[in-house]
């Protein structure tokens, strides 16, 4: 086939028919050369010029792309005055414009283009006006498509180089074919050629190899999705015509996606007028259940729905995006690492939604992005039906986030395995008041019984504070008591000073030096195994040579343990922290799944909420937390099902203040300074062992500890300062 086999119109208007679907996709499928001048250079412009490129690749075609840098008045003045070299400024501005992709489709398209650059099938040149040392902007928007028969189609018009310019805004392009208007097309071919070959008077055109390298570094991924057009735009060919159906607003349910308990939760949510709470344990499918709820409300509202999703961390956003894509939902994605481009995209989509141009939009962001005033202002422009979904919703009990839960959200859904905020009944009550009733309460025990999570062995490992650590712990405990007092109503008040001291005290427990020796002891039988998680505290290894308030000579626990496992035990491990970017994390998870190259991950808090690594078989937990929200999340990370994984093992470092002999020889007053630590460690053991395969192993340790410290009943979380420490570090 050739261009002449298609009925090509002289003009395309986007609201009559999708320009992408009716013009770009079919003609790119016949092209062997695509020449394009795109106006300003940006990551959005790059992505939008990849429509149909997979077909061009199949044809063995190539792309020539011209773009202009978006120079500010200050840039132009700096060039005029000679403060900086022209090319240096241009190069910097171009590279700075390479932002993070705003969604998965854009990410895939940028990867396509980067791959094409690597294969030397795409060449990019930068053009700008330069006359008598006066710099200006080259901003022509011109496109040329060439097929194997020598036919040429030229187009130009108002269309902006952004996703909405192609698929959302009202745009037009004028189209000329060389078999209908040969002279006009010939003029366009000559104009592009002159610019491309740097022979156009007053226009400078040149390659910037550093720009192409920057594109490769930022957007090149392992593997290429050559079916992205079919995924974003459902279409098919037949002999007579090009058939297309846009599925952007169509939410599709993958076959056999939801279990009965998930469907019952959605039904109950509907019964509660689309407001409620999904109280589901980690690993039981909260995200898919929530997306199923989106589809239910979408269908019940005849497709008219705006969805806002807030989650705690960037990596959790990306996991949500992957799951949303499974349902054919392509959200706008917002967080700090993606720059500010998503804000403009969100504004455009909300504008189209309010006008009725789009029936369905979805925005997902981190909690930090959600509370930005500008983002709130943009969301506040939404009219009609809006659904707010908050993942790990217990975080919204804090005042800074709670204040953002307003009546603008007609529909509401909270997701959390631990919505009740420990020690914070006021915050908990406010969350229930906003979101409503529980639609489901699916426990860890139920999930294990239903084989949605794997069974596990719980292996507590007792560690004692050193004498120096114990003395520091007791000293801080004495100081804490001085800053906790009862107000006139008898309510206990914890001062800011007490909270800070409690954090210091907790660091002593988390970084107890004895944990290092115990870890080496219990991990030695596993040094040839794989799929291990070593969970460290966000703390330093306590230095016995330093004052407890001086951490200048301390070393981070995660760094110390990584070195020991690698250098001393010859294990192949890697750190998994907030320092790694999204691509690095993906690579780590993939290597970890394979097992042969990477045996274990040494991690800290970023694994508490959201990261899905089901291949973990054995966990060694050094992070001593007294907050059930945290240790329940950590256990859930380990219990996800995986092929060949029949059970999991959890080694938990139980930190006690003193040995039995020491406890027998101290006063009741001295025991009182440390008893809260003992109780909190026992509480965690009770929780972990309760549904394990070997509860009696933990029972022996629990009974021994209770006897040493004279405890009959365990009181949950007696130490109010300890509560404020955990909450203060979590928010």
Image (cartoon, rainbow, N blue to C red):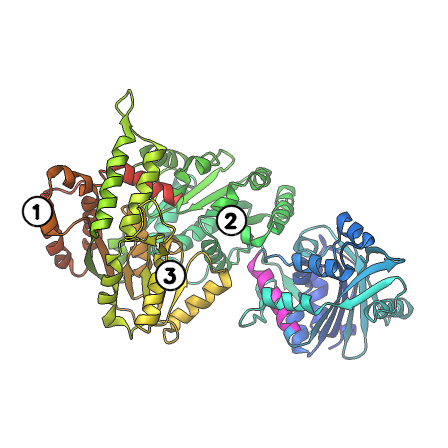
Disc 1 secondary structure class: helix
Q: Which of 664 and 100 is in front in this view?
A: 664
User: Which image quarter is the N terminus in?
Assistant: bottom right
Question: Looking at the picture, how far across and down is residue 13, in whole percent?
Answer: 75, 55
Circle on res. 365: 2
Which residue is found at the position 63% from the left and 65% from the top? 214
Q: Is residue 315 above or below residue 116?
A: above
Circles 2, 3 touching at the beta carbon (< 8 Å): no
- Give the alpha-carbon distance from disc 1 to disc 2, as whole Å: 54 Å
Magenta span of residues: 103-117
The kind of secondary structure the magenta stretch mainly shows is helix
Q: How crowded is mark 1: few (under 14 residues within 10 Å), some or many (20 or more)?
A: few
Residue 640 visible somewhere in the drawing: no
Q: Residues within 10 Å of mark 3 (few under 14, many from 20)?
A: some
Q: In this view, does 666 lie above or below 605?
A: above
Image label count: 3
Is 617 colored magenta in this rendering? Answer: no
- Give the alpha-carbon distance from disc 1 to disc 3, as whole Å: 36 Å
Identify residue for label 3: 559
Could you say which quadrant of the image residue 490 lies in? top left
Identify residue for label 1: 664
Question: Looking at the picture, how far across and down is residue 372, in whole percent?
Answer: 54, 41
Which residue is found at the position 35% from the left and 49% from the top? 264
- Considering only order in the chain, which callout, 3 or 2, is on the residue closer to the N terminus? 2
Which residue is found at the position 46% from the left and 68% from the top? 587
Could you say which quadrant of the image residue 186 lies in? bottom right
Question: Looking at the picture, how far across and down is residue 340, in whole percent?
Answer: 61, 49
377 sits to left or right of 561: right
Which residue is found at the position 33% from the left and 37% from the top? 499
Circles 1, 3 touching at the beta carbon (< 8 Å): no
- As drawn, which residue projects farthest toward the front? 545
- Considering only order in the chain, which callout, 3 or 1, is on the residue closer to the N terminus? 3
């Amino acid at each position: 086939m050739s261009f002449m086999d298609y009925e090509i119109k002289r003009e395309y208007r986007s609201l009559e028919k999708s320009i992408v679907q009716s013009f770009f996709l079919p003609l790119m499928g016949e092209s062997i050369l695509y020449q394009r001048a795109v106006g300003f250079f940006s990551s959005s412009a790059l992505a939008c010029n990849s429509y149909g490129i997979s077909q061009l690749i199949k044809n063995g075609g190539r792309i020539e792309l011209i773009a202009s840098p978006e120079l500010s008045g200050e840039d132009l003045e700096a060039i005029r005055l000679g403060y900086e070299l022209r090319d240096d400024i241009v190069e910097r501005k171009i590279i700075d414009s390479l932002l993070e992709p705003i969604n998965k489709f854009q990410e895939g398209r940028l990867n396509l283009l980067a791959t094409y650059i690597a294969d030397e099938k795409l060449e990019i040149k930068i053009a700008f006006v330069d006359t008598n040392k006066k710099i200006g902007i080259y901003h022509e928007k011109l496109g040329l498509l060439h097929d194997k028969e020598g036919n040429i189609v030229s187009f130009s018009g108002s269309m902006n180089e952004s996703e909405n310019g192609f698929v959302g805004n009202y745009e037009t392009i004028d189209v000329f074919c060389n078999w209908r208007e040969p002279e006009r097309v010939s003029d366009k071919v000559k104009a592009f050629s002159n610019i491309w070959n740097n022979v156009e008077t007053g226009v400078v055109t040149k390659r910037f190899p550093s720009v192409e390298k920057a594109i490769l570094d930022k957007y090149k991924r392992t593997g290429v999705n050559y079916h992205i057009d079919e995924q974003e735009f459902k279409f098919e060919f037949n002999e007579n015509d090009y058939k297309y159906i846009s599925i952007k607003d169509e939410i599709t349910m993958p076959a056999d996606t939801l279990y009965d308990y998930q469907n019952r939760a959605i039904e109950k949510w509907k019964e509660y007028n689309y407001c409620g709470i999904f109280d589901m344990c980690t690993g039981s499918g909260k995200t898919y259940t929530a997306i199923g709820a989106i589809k239910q409300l979408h269908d019940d509202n005849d497709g008219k729905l705006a969805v806002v999703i807030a989650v705690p961390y960037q990596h959790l956003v990306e996991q949500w995006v992957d799951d949303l894509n499974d349902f054919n939902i392509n959200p706008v994605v917002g967080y700090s690492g993606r720059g500010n481009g998503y804000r403009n995209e969100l504004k455009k989509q909300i504008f189209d939604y309010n006008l009725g141009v789009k029936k369905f939009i979805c925005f997902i962001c981190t909690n930090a992005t959600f509370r930005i005033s500008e983002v709130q202002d943009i969301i506040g422009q939404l009219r009609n039906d809006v659904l707010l979904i908050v993942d790990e919703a217990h975080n919204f009990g804090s005042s800074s986030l709670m204040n953002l839960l307003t009546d603008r959200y007609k529909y509401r859904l909270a997701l959390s395995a631990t919505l009740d905020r420990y020690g914070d009944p006021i915050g908990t009550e406010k969350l229930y008041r906003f979101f409503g009733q529980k639609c489901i309460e699916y426990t860890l025990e139920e999930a294990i019984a239903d084989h949605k999570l794997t069974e596990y062995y719980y292996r507590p490992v007792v560690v004692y504070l050193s004498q120096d650590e114990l003395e520091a712990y007791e000293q801080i405990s004495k100081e804490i008591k001085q800053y906790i007092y009862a107000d006139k109503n008898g309510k206990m008040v914890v001062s800011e000073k007490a909270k800070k001291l409690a954090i210091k005290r907790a660091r002593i427990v988390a970084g107890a030096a004895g944990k290092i020796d115990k870890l080496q002891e219990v991990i030695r039988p596993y040094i040839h195994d794989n799929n291990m998680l070593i969970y460290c505290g966000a703390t330093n290894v306590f230095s016995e040579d330093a004052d407890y308030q001086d951490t200048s000579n301390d070393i981070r626990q995660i760094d110390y343990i990584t070195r020991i496992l690698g250098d001393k035990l010859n294990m192949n491990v890697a750190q998994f922290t907030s320092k790694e970017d999204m691509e690095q994390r993906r690579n780590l998870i993939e290597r970890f799944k394979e097992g042969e190259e990477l045996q274990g991950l040494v991690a800290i808090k970023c694994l508490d909420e959201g990261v899905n690594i089901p291949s973990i078989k054995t966990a060694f937990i050094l992070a001593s937390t007294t907050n059930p929200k945290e240790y329940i999340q950590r256990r859930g990370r380990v219990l996800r099902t995986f092929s060949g994984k029949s059970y999991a093992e959890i080694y938990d470092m139980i930190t006690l203040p003193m040995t039995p002999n020491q406890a027998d020889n101290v006063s009741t007053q001295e025991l009182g300074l440390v008893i809260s630590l003992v109780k909190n460690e026992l509480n965690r053991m009770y929780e972990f062992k309760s549904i394990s395969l070997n509860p009696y192993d933990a029972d022996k340790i629990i009974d021994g500890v209770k006897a040493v410290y004279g405890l009959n009943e365990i009181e949950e979380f007696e130490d109010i300062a300890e509560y404020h420490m955990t909450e203060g570090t979590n928010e």
